[in-house]
Amino acid sequence: MTETKDGRQIATIVDVAERAGVAVGTVSRFINGREVRKTNEMRIREAIKELGYQTNTFAQAMKTDVTKTIALVMDGFDEFHTQVLSNAITRFFDHGYQVTTYHLKNERGGLDNLMSIMNARKFDGVVMSGTFNNTISLEQLRTLQKPIVLFNDEATGIDIDRVLVNNREVSKRAVQHMVEMGHKRIAIVKASDKQSSSRGRFQGFCDAMMDAGHEVRDEYICEGDWKLADGYFALKELMDLPEPPTALFSVNYEMTMGVLEAMKEMGLEVAKDLSLVSFDDPYFFRLLNPSITAIAQPHEEIASRLVDMMLTRLNKDISSSSRKMTVACDVILRDSVTKIL
């Protein structure tokens, strides 16, 4: 142990090696992000935890260009992104990495500002959410020559690792549930088709309607930008139609909240006046009366997959071809879809 000026005892790499029963060089390799034997890795992790050992990431970066820091770039911190972020931070921390978050706004100069910040700081890789203009953002970020893992968007045409959910297939199943409950006049509140997550959810909606022989009516398709206000105004517009829908599929929970707000304002009841299914399943949906049927995204698994992808890139040649992984969502049946004759 080394003693600081204020008398505190600080563990050194030698202490970690002695506690783990391995060579100092083995601990050094592990700290610098290189592979060591699994048994040695477990011993070193346990020793670091017991001793409270902390690496000097600045000095480490100066010597090796390895910072043990991951940049996580998002355009917002809604419940979905916050859940994925929380799980990813925990998993990265378990592997000796810290995470720095960056907020990339959809506004002029936002990306340039981000690039300036990221060029000034050292990091080992970038995890990025795909809810903004990925083509421009990703191409610029790739100039940093660091591993990038994308989640929540396909980013077609760009050679990049990505973690997706089965948007089309699970949306089809959710809408099929409404069809099986007797609904034919089913509307959708969607986002832009430029984003693969919205596009997949809309395709799943259309698949279910066409398989059932039901018309996809133009007046039942409302497009927004993932925001609460989009759902609010969409519901008002839909219920003012000469023949309003009997059921609605909303492609994210914020727009669903807008739908619920508008329904309350108009004196309409979920299930009784309009059946409702939401993509995303925030906790409060199960507390409402009636509770909301929803598509639950596996936040923990998404985080686990993207962390594993990043660690693989950091430990191996980053020049190999990109990988895509799709994780499955669940349809959680509750009480917001009523059966009609």
Image (cartoon, rainbow, N blue to C red):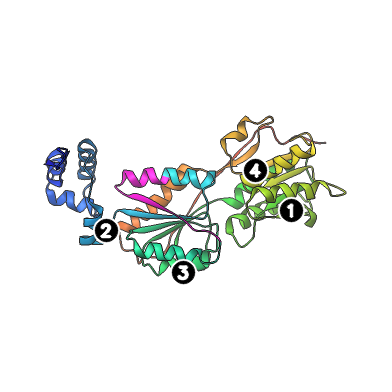
- Residue for point 62% across, 40% down: 294
Q: Residues within 10 Å of mark 4 (few under 14, many from 20)?
A: many
Q: How far separated are the C-alphas under marks 3 and 1? A: 37 Å
Viewer-side residue, 45 vs 51? 51
> Is 237 in front, or is 31?
237
Residue 306 spot, x, y in % from top left: 42, 51
User: Dividing the picture into quarters, in which one does residue 289 lie?
Assistant: top right
Q: Which residue is mark 4?
A: 278
Q: Quadrant of residue 140?
A: bottom left
**The magenta stretch spans which residues?**
88-106
Question: For mark 3, what is the residue?
Answer: 139
Q: Is residue 270 magenta?
A: no
- Indicate left or right for 23 with 123 as reference: left
* The magenta stretch spans residue 93: yes
Q: Earlier in the sequence, mark 2 or mark 1?
A: 2
Q: Nearer the viewer, residue 295 or 281?
A: 281
Q: Is residue 302 visible?
A: yes
Q: Nearer the viewer, mark 3 or mark 4?
A: 3
**Helix, strand, or loop for circle 4?**
strand
Q: Quadrant of the N terminus?
A: top left
With 203 as the anchor, is 154 left or right in this view?
left
In terms of depth relative to the viewer, which is nearer, 224 or 119? Answer: 119
Question: CA gap, disc 3 to disc 2?
Answer: 23 Å
Point 33% across, 58% down: residue: 123
